[in-house]
Amino acid sequence: MEFLTQPWAWYVSGPLIALSMFLMFYFGKRLGISSNLENMCSVVGAGRLVDYFKFDWKKNNWNLAFMFGLILGGFLATNYLTPDTNIQLNPNTVEHLQELNFKEVGNTYLPSEIFSMESVLSIKGFSILLLAGLLVGFGARYAGGCTSGHAIVGLSMLELPSLIAVIGFFIGGLTMTWFILPVIFK
């Protein structure tokens, strides 16, 4: 059962993603996390406040099952299928992150400087999460979908708007990594 505790090779996971996309395309479905979040907002009654969320979410209930599966799968993988939380990082990456005051680089998947309750409940941590959430929500809405929707589904369907969106995501990620994060964490 070693295959359950090790990352799957690209030549296994890549074709599985392609097969999933083919099956979804065949059955007329589109995959993306932002559409799942729209469904969740509709389920809890956001349509009473915002017309955008007034739609029959039951037509997309498979999306909610997908979202539940993501959460359940992440929980199972983290708690039962991960033998060791230490990760191997390039020494240059470790050095760079330590310069940014990250202390336990490589000892955990989620750095406590960002994801601990102490960090989240601080003014700085809460502000970062609030701003990040607003920017991601605005970006997903403005781009007509999220990173997974555009990068996996849109590109597999050869959609030019998805290619433009993915290029924008990469530019944004590089800008954040190399210019904004160093200012926030120094």
Image: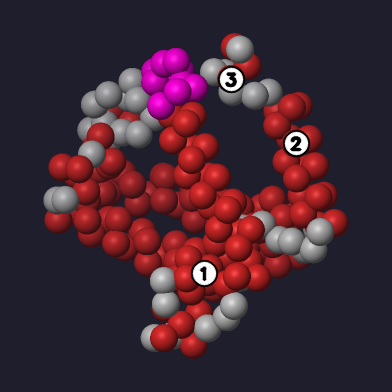
- The quarter of the rendered structure image containing the C terminus is top left
**Count of numbered circles in the view:** 3
Foreground residue, 153 or 100?
Answer: 153
Seen in the image, is 37 located left or right of residue 161?
Answer: left
Q: Which mark is residue 4?
A: 3
The residue located at (53%, 68%) in the rendering is 39
Eyeballing the image, is 58 above or below 181?
below
The residue located at (55%, 58%) in the rendering is 64
Q: Earlier in the sequence, mark 2 or mark 1?
A: 2
**How far, Cα to Cα, is label 2 from label 1?**
26 Å
Q: Name the amino acid type tagged 2.
A: Leu
Tell me the quarter of the picture where residue 162 sits: bottom right
Q: Name the amino acid type tagged 1.
A: Glu
Which residue appears farthest toward the right when viewing the image? 26
Instruction: Provide residue 114's location: percent of width, then percent of height.
Output: 27, 42
Instruction: Provide residue 110's location: percent of width, then percent of height.
Output: 35, 34
Q: Which mark is residue 16?
A: 2
Q: Main secondary structure of the magenta part?
A: loop
Q: Which mark is residue 38?
A: 1
- The quarter of the rendered structure image containing the N terminus is top right
Classify mark 1: helix, strand or loop: helix
Classify mark 3: helix, strand or loop: helix
Foreground residue, 128 or 3?
Answer: 3
Is label 1 in contact with label 3 (beta carbons under 8 Å)? Answer: no
